[in-house]
Amino acid sequence: MQAMSQVPSRAAAGFASAFGADPAGLWAAPGRVNLIGEHTDYNDGFVLPFALPHRVVVAAAAVPTPRWRVWSEQTGETVEFGAAEADEPGRVEGWAGYVAGVVWTLRSKGYEVPGADLAVASDVPAGAGLSSSAALESAVLTALADLGGLALPVEDRPGLAQRAENDYVGMPCGIMDQSASIRAEAGHALFLDCRSLAIEQIPFDVAASGLAVLVVDTQAPHRHAGGEYASRRRACEEAAALLGVPALRDVSDLDAALEKLTDDVMRRRVRHVVTENQRVLDTVDLLRAGRVREIGPLLTASHASMRDDFEITVPEVDLAVSTALAAGAYGARMTGGGFGGCVLALIDATETDRVAAAVAAAYAERGFTAPVWFAARPGPGAERIE
């Protein structure tokens, strides 16, 4: 994985090469790891993500006409679109659709979005469940807001970025990823109430506790992630309607709710969401009290719920979790929407290499693609960096 310090210079160099000038500035937004609270966001529940030190960096400059040119380091291509393409959801496809979606959502809300040239570089692993798309949206949004002098309150920005992904790109994600990418603070996890959008910065200085969060990119491909994600969301919304509540967050008596539902799959989906919300609240209480090690069993219980009740894990993910636990992790779970992606494990800081090696050995024994790993510390949210 590339060092973060190289990404801004790569974005600036890419801008100069693609557009023949220097950028007006550099803006960055992080990927995220969700400590706990999976598939609770679109159920009006609670989540506890933190921002990674890995970021998408956008080098940008305003231009006088309403058109946007975007260069990607990852693909090497430059995509250009004008107001007509930006104003029609889905018209710009692929990775550039996330950029066009930001332009669209701002224009649809009446903002005078400046035309711009943008160059994108990143060290957020794509396809790993670390929200590289939200990081791209958030970095572009922050850049365009600054370039255009737009009066965008920070509390409104996650919803705008989410709308770009929901309504322009067509991915029905909740608001957690964009909230973490924009509103997170270094050394903290972001406790977000996805209904009220109230946030609280929860201290999560793992290094001070002698701990580390090991993030393992399982390299498992996201199998049917889009359709499966949508089907899980649909099941939750149908269950809420049958139970007569606005969202599953409002289920206060789980046993009574499960008795009302006849479909076993729907019952398991509901059980995951309701118990996961409680695990988030319990984790927050422990972290407020400085009892970081004690959140481990909650992380592990979360994974079991995702595996058995929400059915969103895959063999590579389950193996990484069980191996990390056998190697001494205090807790481990899949993080992200599921069907591939990453696992996080709470471990003693001195054990990082040993636990990672144990997972790699288990993968080799099963013939899985070798995993990639890093130790994560909570970083800052979206900001101008130069």
Image (cartoon, rainbow, N blue to C red):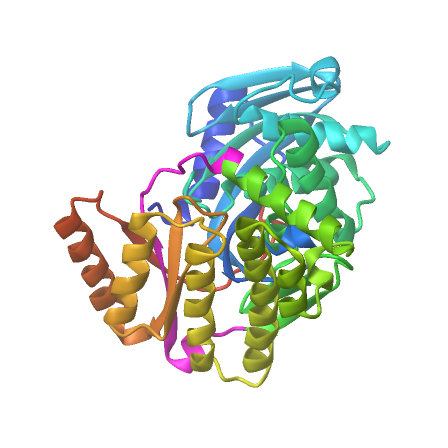
Instruction: Name above or below for residue 59 compared with residue 178.
Output: above
Q: Which residue is at the front of the view, 71 or 366? A: 366
Asked if residue 32 shows in the view, the reply is: yes
In front: 76, or 337? 337
Vertical comparison of 276 with 40: above or below: below
202 lies above or below 271: below
Query: In the figure, 335 relative to 174: above or below?
Result: below
Question: In front here: 384 or 94?
Answer: 94
On the image, the x and y values in percent for residue 296 come to 42, 75
Q: Hey, which residue is sitting farthest left in the picture?
A: 365
Residue at 49% of width from left, 53% of height from top? 310
Q: Quadrant of residue 254?
A: bottom right
Instruction: List x then y, in percent, for residue 34.
Output: 51, 58
Q: Quadrant of residue 195?
A: bottom right
Question: What residue lies at 77% left-to-right and 56% top-to-bottom?
Answer: 245
Residue 208 magenta-highlighted: yes
User: Is 240 or 281 nearer to us in this picture?
Assistant: 240
Q: Is residue 20 visible?
A: no
The total number of labels drawn is 0
Q: Which residue is found at the position 48% from the left and 42% from the top?
A: 8
Q: Position of residue 367 (x, y in %)?
A: 16, 44
Numbered range of the magenta stretch: 204-227
What's the residue at 68%, 45% (across, down)? 238
**Magenta residue check for 384:** no
With 368 as the anchor, is 294 left or right in this view?
Answer: right
Q: Position of residue 320 (x, y in %)?
A: 29, 57
Image position of 136 (left or right of 219):
right
